[in-house]
Amino acid sequence: MESKAAPAAQQVHADGSWRRLAVVWFRRLHIYLSMASFTILLFFAVTGLTLNHAEWFTAGHSSNRHCKGHLEATWVKPPDAAVAKLEIVEGLRREHGIQGALGEFIIDEAQCTISFKGPGYAADISLDRTTGDYVLNESRLGGVAILNDLHKGRDSGHAWSLLIDASALMMSLISLSGLVLLCFFRRRRGTGLAVAISGSLLCYLIYLLLVP
């Protein structure tokens, strides 16, 4: 009897050790991922609210500027010569403190149309190729609009796009590690899974029944 009981006891001990080790590592993964991504998760949570109720936060916080200026005529030569794009862009930035990345630089025979885009920011310039005169229209939509555009990744550049991808991956891992961790606790497993399924069904029913 003892020879048969010993392997069974060893198997139970091995299973228990594996479960304890798995619980430890999934708990660590869940906790440290949550802490590492705390700021970015809070950012996307808060800006989800500001996006959903933009009218609460953006009214009265925008500013617009309309002005005229002149650039070197040699930079905007006739159609048979090249337009000095770099000099024009840098000259406009120095003169007016233009922000954002260069969006478009459209050249035709009579004029150049230039646009700069950034989170919560836009600047559009119409430049006469004959005289070098231009008109600038600039819009600054305020701090909340900047946060909202960062949430959406609009005009925020490649680095911020990678950060959004990384935050999405971390959110997924946090959710999955929490679900796996729950499965190791028998007393709370049923209740926890029931709550998770109920929440998922509630979201689906709201979409199915209440979303136009």
Image (cartoon, rainbow, N blue to C red):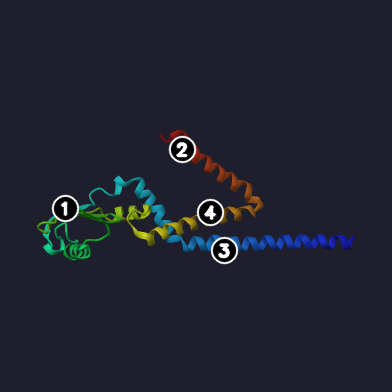
Task: Work out whether mark 2 precedes mark 4 in sequence or the reverse, and give the earlier one.
Answer: 4
Q: CA distance from mark 2 to mark 1?
A: 52 Å
Q: Amino acid at mark 3?
A: Arg
Which mark identifies residue 67? none
Q: Residue at x 63, y 49 (%)?
A: 189
Q: Residue at x 68, y 60 (%)?
A: 19
Q: CA distance from mark 2 to mark 3?
A: 35 Å
Secondary structure of the residue carrying tag 1 is: loop
Secondary structure of the residue carrying tag 2 is: helix
Q: Residues within 10 Å of mark 4 (few under 14, many from 20)?
A: few
Q: Amino acid at mark 2?
A: Tyr
Secondary structure of the residue carrying tag 4 is: helix
Which mark identifies residue 207? 2
Q: Nearer the viewer, mark 4 or mark 1?
A: 1
- Give the residue pinned by disc 4: 175
Task: Using the rendered view, name the quadrant where residue 82 is placed.
Answer: bottom left
Q: Position of residue 28 (x, y in %)?
A: 57, 63
- Give the residue pinned by disc 3: 28
Front-lying residue, 155 or 207: 155
User: Relative to residue 8, is residue 180 drawn left or right?
Assistant: left
Front-lying residue, 4 or 120: 120
Q: Position of residue 50 (x, y in %)?
A: 35, 49
